[in-house]
Image (cartoon, grey):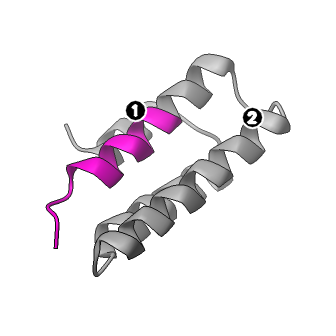
Amino acid sequence: MNETQKLVEMNLPPLIQSRATSHLERIARAADNASRTLAGERAAGFVEGLEAARALTPATIEALFLIFDDATDSLPAQ
């Protein structure tokens, strides 16, 4: 199962779902390792903001961190 499918299965609120998907797409489109790392850090910052706002449960926050980490680490090095 890919990361986008994992996001869909989480049943996130529509705006959060949209932003999270956008972050995953940026990670996937990254042209090189530096760009991929930056996109992954931005995605982590997005999740940290959700955590600070207490917008989602701790379990959902952790799942988002793992999804973004997996996406950032799973792409082949360029």
Q: Which residue is mark 1?
A: 9
Residue at x 66% of width, y 52% of height = 45
Q: Position of residue 47 (x, y in %)?
A: 64, 44
Q: Position of residue 38 (x, y in %)?
A: 49, 67
Q: Does residue 16 show up?
A: no
Q: Residues within 10 Å of mark 1 (few under 14, many from 20)?
A: few
**58 up-or-down from 66: above or below:** above
Residue situated in front as seen by the camera: 49 or 32: 32
Q: Which residue is mark 2?
A: 51
The CA distance from mark 1 to mark 2 is 19 Å
Q: Quadrant of residue 56?
A: top right
Helix or strand or loop: what does disc 2 sit on?
helix
Q: Residues within 10 Å of mark 2 (few under 14, many from 20)?
A: some
* Residue range of the region highlighted in magenta in the rendering: 65-78
Nearest to N terminus: mark 1 or mark 2: 1
Helix or strand or loop: what does disc 1 sit on?
helix
Q: Main secondary structure of the magenta part?
A: helix
Q: Position of residue 5 (x, y in %)?
A: 31, 42
